Amino acid sequence: MPNPQTTNRHKPSARRGREPAHDRPSARAPVARGVFGHVGESPTQAQETEPITGTRAKPATEGAVLVTGVCGRLGKLLARELHRTDQVVGVDRRPFDDRPKDIVHHQIDIRRKKMKDIFRGRNIRAVVHLGVLHDPRRSDRDRHSWNIVAFQKLLDYMSQYEVPKLVVLSGANVYGPQPSNPQFLTEDAPLLGAQHFGGMRDLVELDMLAQSFFWKHPNTETVVLRPCHIVGRVHNAASNYLRLERPVMVMGFDPMMQVVHEKDVVRAVQLALRPGVRGIFNIRGPGEMPLSHLIRQVGGRPRLVPSSLAKVALDQLWRLRLSGFPSQELDHLRYVCMVDDSRARAELGYEPAHPIDRVLKDVRRLRYQLG
Amino acid sequence: MAQRGSIVPFAGWRRTRLLGESPLRQALRSVGDRVVRLAEDVVGQDLDARIAGIRTHLNEVGHDPFGFDPETSRYALAMAALLHRRYFRTQVFGINRVPQGRVLIVANHSGQLPLDAVMIGSAMMLDADPPRFPRSMVETWTAELPFISTLYPRLGQVVGSPENARRLLRQEESLIVFPEGARGISKTYDQRYQLTDFGLGFVRLAIETGTPIVPVAVIGGEEQYPSVADFKPLARLLKMPAFPVMPQMFFGMLAPLPTKYRLYFGEPFRFDGDPDDDDSAIEEKVWLVKSTIQSMVNRGLRERKGVFI
């Protein structure tokens, strides 16, 4: 539902001004080459006489932030944090009923043509792409269409309308759990996540697409965030696993694990939105510990199952739709897949703020709420 | 959590039993403690104090990022101390040549099971003063083995990748490296004490991180499990680097033969130059280390009176 109070409140000229980049002067030029430039003086005169004020185009810091997948738990958290300082435009197929008043929400599929109208209609200063489909139950085709085709369209619009910032939430899973992994993976490590688990293929491809966009469009500051397992009140595989009373552990394996609080990830996205930040950043939580310790601290009791039996049983349960975990994900319970966040600390200024007790408390709280 | 009352007798027993430590774990702990006390009596050293002296770089939640667990290591050190002092009666020469701070300990590899690493490790923990806690770089395939993959990190072993080694050396830790790798440990008896090809990675690493290399000759490892052949088809089937055929197994002797171990620590090498130099330039330095270890081994063999004495 459009909100008449907030749409284009700061930018009366925007609706007319947003045209494809190739037939208009750069919208983000710092001085008066704005859309009304032809009415008064010539652009060069305006530049000389009135360099800062006047009818200039909005600089990069004064646009709206478009958040895809805003109705997920993480998206909502991010929107609630961002709307205090920025205009937020949310896009999701799901409704966003309890949103703050100044958030504009478009309940559409990002593959729709309407998406282009959003870019044309307002000054978008940044896109945060959270709308990634992780559901392993969906067919490969669905996932590909949603994750890759949709993302490609989004990137097309971004280059067409010269959006200066892109933040993509990838994940440490793209590196994949491998026995040969170093204890801490840096951003340069190869993305082998799909080697043993085909379901990861499109997530790896999405990460690659963002990387190629980074090189192809140097004017857009592209940031790829690869956090370790995000937990808290989100409904993802890692949180759901930790919420189980008796989670399965593979007998004889107890890898070191990293978890990060959802709010720390939200803060990392906010830091990534600052102008001047670009690149790939691993995001790590408040410290790593063996999986068994993690489960015990959440209050669960691990159920030790031999690897071969676990695989057969999980395959069968998956087929009968009794379990939400495909058996290939067992590798996460066997091998390390941890990240080194020194680059994020140095360049992004990121530091996990939530201690491990708080992280696990939030995981646990939802378990009791669910009963 | 508030205790909920129930009119059903013993309704809460299951919960209270499960919240505590399992009986099996309690039993293991008490057995472990006895082993530690026994080892302390035999060795005459305070093992717990030595374990407590280990300083690793703990993370924010108080764990070693590589998975080192002092609790498990105390039992392992007790077992290693018994092996070191009583079973193999290890003699250690020149341990004070190991410099403080970051160091790479490079040794010849032998004996089918990596007991040579255990002996070097226990020598560093028991004979060096102050005790040093060395980590050894293990083969990647051990990370695929159940139980081993849990045990090794808890004892401070690390999967052998250059990134891990670099990180540990920057933390001023000491690393045990066997540049011969699986080729060295699975040698047959006819090739005993002949060093096989060394990898080049350790010298590049030492140059890059400015780490001294201490050469170590291990005598006594080759005779603990004499192997007469390497049964390759079975090794391939089991995805192992080698499948040694050991005659003592046919007589039901699973334990290694009680050979006498001798460890010779040499003067440290300090290399400088370009870590990305050509292989030929690096090979010269590797050859220097290798020939030093080989000559130390030869001297050790000449000096010893017998395999078991």
Image (tube, coloured by chain):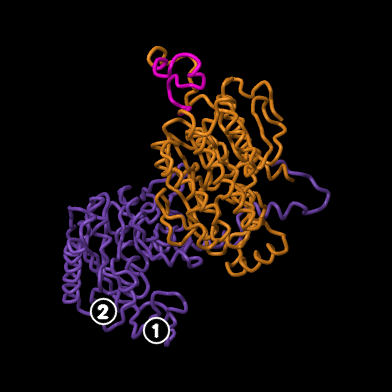
Chain colours: A orange, B purple
Residue drawn 42% across the image and 41% down it? A279
Q: Does the stretch in magenta take in A35?
A: yes
| Camera-nearest residue between B134 and B200 | B200
Q: Position of residue B122 (x, y in %)?
A: 33, 62
> How far apart are the alpha carbons under marks 1 and 2?
18 Å
Mark 2: amino acid: Arg
In the displayed structure, A268 sits above or below B201; it is above
In this view, the residue farthest toward the right is: B7
| Camera-nearest residue between A92 and A84 | A92
Quarter location, residue A218: top left
The image quadrant where one finds the N terminus of chain A is top right
In this view, the residue farthest toward the top is: A49
Element assignment for label 1 = loop
Q: Does the stretch in magenta take in B189?
A: no
- Residue bearing the label numbered 1: B231
Q: Position of residue B35 (x, y in %)?
A: 45, 63
In the displayed structure, B294 sits above or below B95; it is below
Residue drawn 40% across the image and 42% down it? A342
Viewer-side label of 1, 2: 1
Give, as a single range, the part of the protein colored magenta: A26-47
